[in-house]
Every structure is written in C-alpha cells, then in structure tokens.
Image (tube, helix red, strand yellow):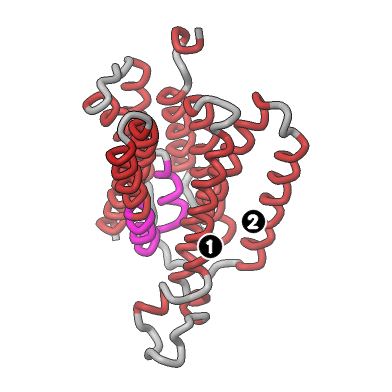
Amino acid sequence: MAAMTWLTILLAFIGNSVLNISQAGQKIGLALMQRDRRRGALLWAGCLLGTTVAALIGWLAVSIGRVALVGAMAGSGLPSLALFSYLVMKERIRTRELAGIALMVGSAVLIGLFQRELPPGEPSLSLLFSVLAVLCAAALLAWAALRRRSRIVGPLIAAFAGMLGGFVPVFQKVAGSLAGRGSSFLASLLEKGHWAHAVANPFTPLWILLSIASMVVIQFAYRHERAVRLIPYFTSCSILVPVLGGVFVFSERLQAAQWVGVALILTGLMLLTLPAAEDSA
C-alpha cells in the first residue's frame, strides 16, 4: 500500500507541475501574440492542451489515492514553475524562493511518510453539494458587493477560482466511487464493475465544468490585481478545499504530522509567491 501512496504523490506532483507550467506558457503565448499572432496562438493552444493533460493526470492520482493527499499536493507544481522560470524565462531564484521549494518538497515527503492506507469511504453527497452551493453563493454575493474595490475583490475572485478548482479532485473521487459508478450512463450496456462506469457518469462532466469555471474565473481576478498577489489566494483554496473535502465528505483522516505538512506547504507557498521588497517598490 505504501507504494500506492508514493505513486499518488508522484502523479499529483507531475499533474500540478504540468498545470502550472502550462498556465505560464499561456501567459507567454498571449504576450507573443502581440508580435507574432500565429506563433503566440499555437503556443497558447498547446499549453491549453497541457492543462487538459494535467487534469487527466490529477484524475488518475485521485483514482488510486485519497482526496486529502492529492489536495495537499495542489501547490507542489510551483517549485517546477520556479525552475521553469529560471531555465526558460531566465528569472533569478532568490534564497527565500529556494527555501520555499525545499519546504514544499519536504512537506510532501512528510505527508507521505505518515500516510495510513484505509478502505475508502463512500461520499456524503448531500453535504458535498450543500457546501458547494453555499460557498458559490457566498463568493458571488461578495464579488457583487465588493466589485468596485479592486484591492479586495481581486484576491476574493482568485480565492473563488481556487475553491472551484479545489472541488475538482473531490468530484473526480466521487465519479470513481460506488455512488458514481452506480449512476453510470452505460449501466444497461456494460456489465457491473466495468472501468467505463467510473467515467461515464454525471460527476465526470461536473468536474470538467468546475475545472473550466476555475480557469475562466481567475481571468476576472487578473483585471484587478497582479498575478503574483493572486497566486497565494488561489493555491491556498485549491489545497484546503480537497483536504477538508476528503476529511468531511469521504471520512478520511490526516494524522497530526500530516496537518503540520499541510501548514508547511502553505508556508512554502507564501515564500514562493509573496513579492520581495524590491518588487513591491
């Protein structure tokens, strides 16, 4: 079972790395369009495909591992993005950023070392949909109320986008559960237990829509604030939602050392993304 835990961590790391690098590539493509429309569009489209591949890798990770474990790894792609920025974009990696990378990698190892493999629980769908509805309604109301206050609404929208993205691994896990398989569109065509039932059910298009919605919503946040200030809000929510979703929806359990690992990942995230004094100036 320990091997499956480390495979889950590896897949989550690869998926998040592909996602973050693809997002950076999309920004490069948009900038390149101003000089060379064709090349910029091709780069942007290729990186859009990369985000799709990342979602599929994440689905594979959550299908063999626990939601809370995959959720805790949601920020693990940022060290890969920092390395990408250094090698491709020729950006300097500061000492503080190196410390953030080391802290996040070490925290992922800590979470894996204390992982206990338990039989997966069946999801509490009523709780899941109720929480999703309440959080979406609260975020939309706050967005409408604070729309003229850019310094506040930008981080709020980024957190909303991260929250939507955080629900993706939760619904991916639901799609592969007995409840998800039992609602398969192919129940009358394929025998019970066929792998296709884990994909061909109502929860699969739902997590795809949530993934698209997260990508669209974050674009509105960019209108109000710089990306470097928005990333901590987006990624923090994309970590906390699946971790808490695994605990409350699937009755998963994290040990005390693993909660420390989650806190350290968030700390490493801040070290990686908060602007330095010279940047703020």
The residue where tag 2 is placed is: 132
Extreme-left residue of the structure: 87
Q: Is residue 231 left or right of residue 15?
A: right
Q: Observer-nearest residue: 276 or 65?
A: 276
User: For the magenta stretch, what is the residue range?
Assistant: 53-74
Can residue 109 be seen?
no
**Mostly what secondary structure, the magenta segment?**
helix
Amino acid at pointer 2:
Leu
Instruction: Give the Cα separation between the discs numbered 1 and 2.
Output: 15 Å
**Residue 201 lies within the magenta run:** no
Residue 152: image location, x then y, percent: 67, 28
Amino acid at pointer 1:
Phe
Residue 33: image location, x then y, percent: 36, 35
Q: Is residue 50 left or right of residue 178?
A: left
Image quarter of residue 67: bottom left
Describe the element under mark 2 as helix, strand or loop: helix
Tag in front: 1 or 2: 2
